[in-house]
Amino acid sequence: MLRKIFRPIGNSLHTGNQNKRKDSSSSKRWLARQMRDPFVKEAQIQHYRARSAFKLLEIDSRFHIFKPGDYVIDCGAAPGSWSQVAADKVNALSTEKQNQSQIISCLGDKMADCLISDMAPNATGIKDLDHENIVCLASEVFAFAASILKQDGIMLCKIWDGYLYGNLKTNLEKSFTNCKIVRPDASRKESSELFILAKGYNKS
């Protein structure tokens, strides 16, 4: 599947020891948050690879993006919880990681019903730069969708809130009959993540 990582830019002003202490402190906070998170616990119970599965489950419950027999492309597919949900919803036996050309080759004369993406670049900590990076990534997903989505197909893509998301939504509205911003309950309260749900792809 598609996978692109944007790495942090710039040099650190901290010494190695300072970085180690900072990393250790961040790791402890992350672990404490994970232990308190009800979605993390439920993911373990239901054997999902990550808590993000519940974001997709909620979106599908509200907007019915999957139907049995659909062809679904999961961009990124790491750690794979969205692929687990999609495969279950469309009754697929398995999913495989492919690059774009391989996906198109495997589809043959068929087109995808739905393209989903929970991908995100590595965060730099600079809000505007992180936002620009994820919008760039979402734009690449959209470009790929144009080559593999069937008429009236669906695209679901993660972004982070910021000044460019309106422009991205406007561009998608030129090719989809309905575009909306969705924020599932499973998204953490402190997170700026949003999901663009675009339905009714027009191939003309």
Image: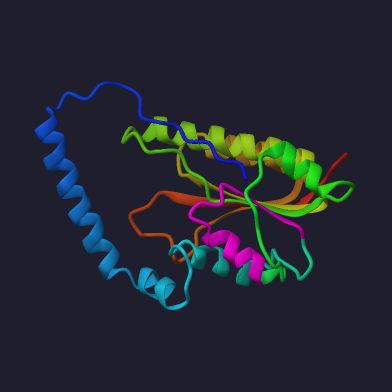
Front-most of residues 192 and 140: 140
What residue is drawn where x is 55% and y is 69%? 58
Apparent side of residue 84 relative to residue 25 in the rendered image (left or right): right
Give the color scheme: rainbow, by chain, secondary structure or one colour: rainbow
Q: Is residue 39 above or below residue 189?
A: below
What residue is drawn where x is 56% and y is 63%? 56
Front-most of residues 55 and 17: 17
Whole-percent x, y for residue 160 in the image: 46, 44
Front-most of residues 80 and 163: 80
Q: How many marks?
A: 0
Q: Is residue 11 above or below residue 78?
A: above
Where, by quadrant of the figure, is residue 11 drawn? top left
Is residue 109 magenta-colored?
Answer: no
Q: Is residue 6 above or below residue 196?
A: above
Front-most of residues 163 and 145: 145
Apparent side of residue 111 relative to residue 38 in the rendered image (left or right): right
**Residue 95 in view in this figure:** yes
What residue is drawn where x is 65% and y is 38%? 170
Q: Is residue 167 above or below residue 45?
A: above
Range drawn in magenta: 71-88
What residue is drawn where x is 45% and y is 50%? 193
**Residue 59 in view in this figure:** no
Whole-percent x, y for residue 142 in the image: 67, 39
Q: Quadrant of the C terminus?
A: top right
Whole-percent x, y for residue 50 in the image: 44, 62
Apparent side of residue 144 relative to residue 25 in the rendered image (left or right): right
Residue with the most extreme top position = 11
Whole-percent x, y for residue 165 in the image: 54, 39
Q: Quadrant of the N terminus?
A: top right
